[in-house]
Image (tube, rainbow, N blue to C red):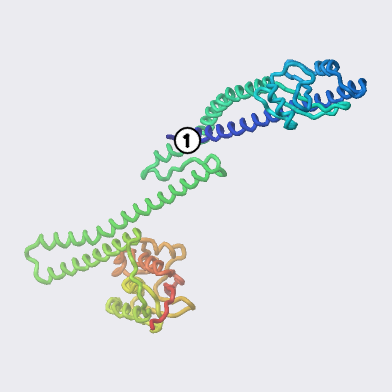
Amino acid sequence: MTIRARITIWYTLVLAVTLAIAGAITYAAVRQQIERASDASMTSTARTLAAGLADEAGESNGVLEVRAANELLTEFRDHERAVVLLTPDGREFAGHGTPVDPALLHQLATTHAFGFRNATTVRLLLEPLRVGNQDFVLVIAQSLAAQQETLADLQKAMLITAPLALLVASLGGYVLARKSLAPVVRMSAKARDISATNLSERIEVVNARDELGELAATLNALLARLDESFAAQRRFMADASHELRSPVTILQGELDVTLSRDDRNAADYRESLEVMRRSVRRLTRIVRDLFLLARSDAGDVPLKRETLYLGELVSQTVRAYRTVAAERKVTLIAECDEELVVSGDEDLLQRMTGNLVENAIRYAPLGTEVLIRCTAAGNEARIEVRDRGEGVPDELRERIFERFFRVDRARGATPTTAGSGAGLGLPIARWIAAEHGGALRLEQSDSTGSLFVVTLPRGSSPV
């Protein structure tokens, strides 16, 4: 069932209940008003009759004659109302025929059941009277036929008009629901037309201030995020393919050259194997970094948190890179607080530190130093890695943390190292810092060098 149909049905049901309640209240109010008007008329008749009977008795020395009483009662009698004058013992003294059972009148009069009473098709008013020297009971019987006929006509009118009103309201509700939901239909049609090839298209926002406008704006924001995500994925795939193609091409070339000649000596073979080994190492590292990034994007890298001495962890990482630094004639200097404690994954933190140290070695000029420091700053632990390279332009300081983005020329990399990285080290390092509740930023970068700073929450020392 469509939303339009459900809205129409609910609207009709609510209106039906409302009409039923309103009709019942109206019917009860009209009935009460008719009864009240009839009772007021009967009361007024009783007072007039009482005054007239008292006058008749006064003319006869306090004794009411039957003939005079009948004549007076006849004046107030019509086809819908009868008037009877009873003695205290329930016998009829004066009056005309009445549809009320005489036995009932006798019972009411003798039991002093005065006031208003309903008796089958009439409504009775019994009033005690003192006329001259005599006591009587005045009975006015009002037929209920006219009231019942009026109420029946009202009920019939309600039974006719209510269904017609529901029918008109249902049609109107359906039209209104269809008109109100027309923007949703257009948004659905537009959303169906949008695919991975045209994510740049957007849904029209007719009125940004209503709920449908907010829905359209939300869908447009979602499409913008999807467009950005798809674009990033396409760039990632293109960059990854490019990075993987280079070592594979080198391997293929070396293999083709090695197998194409039969007169090569051991030194030639060894040189080719060294080239292939370097390509395999680079290929292995790229694949490992891609695998880690893919798992991080999927949230599938559980952290094995443990209490670690940050100074010891950084010192071990620096020692592991001294051979790499020596090949570049770069000196690594580590100044770490050995008592600095953090909580985190030892392998990931070593990898983060290693990426930063390797990045500094790659862009440090020959014969310079790379300084690695670990210090405490309030509730944070800081890892600082400073090199003496050419620095990063201001407009590129955030882009260096994008995947596969490199600024070799801007940082003055030498031909021997330019392009040796895949542009994944810094993005991975920033991700690791963020996973540990910290941050990685380029705090300083100019002609004197660059300073990368990692901040991590400090932990408590183990007992």
Give left or right: position of 174 versus 232: right
**Residue 233 placed where, x, y %?**
35, 53
Image vertical order of residue 283 relative to residue 64, above or below: below
Is 207 or 1 nearer to us in this picture? 1
- In terms of image quadrants, where is residue 207? top right
Give left or right: position of 56 versus 416: right
Image vertical order of residue 28 relative to residue 80, above or below: below
Circle 1 crowding by C-alpha within 10 Å: few under 14, some 14–19, many from 20: few
Whether residue 207 is visible here, answered yes or no, is yes
Image vertical order of residue 317 relative to residue 136, above or below: below
- In terms of image quadrants, where is residue 344? bottom left
Residue at 72%, 26% in the rendered image? 106
- In terms of image quadrants, where is residue 172? top right
Residue at 23%, 62% in the rendered image? 247
**Residue 227 placed where, x, y %?**
40, 49
Give left or right: position of 180 versus 441: right
Whether residue 363 is visible here, answered yes or no, is no
Is 175 or 459 nearer to us in this picture? 175
The quadrant of the rendering that contains the N terminus is top left
Residue at 41%, 71% in the rendered image? 390
Is 155 or 463 nearer to us in this picture? 155
Residue at 30%, 61% in the rendered image? 290
Give left or right: position of 119 versus 396: right
* Residue pointed to by mark 1: 6
**Residue 78 placed where, x, y %?**
76, 16
Q: Residue type at mark 1?
A: Arg
The quadrant of the rendering that contains the C terminus is bottom left
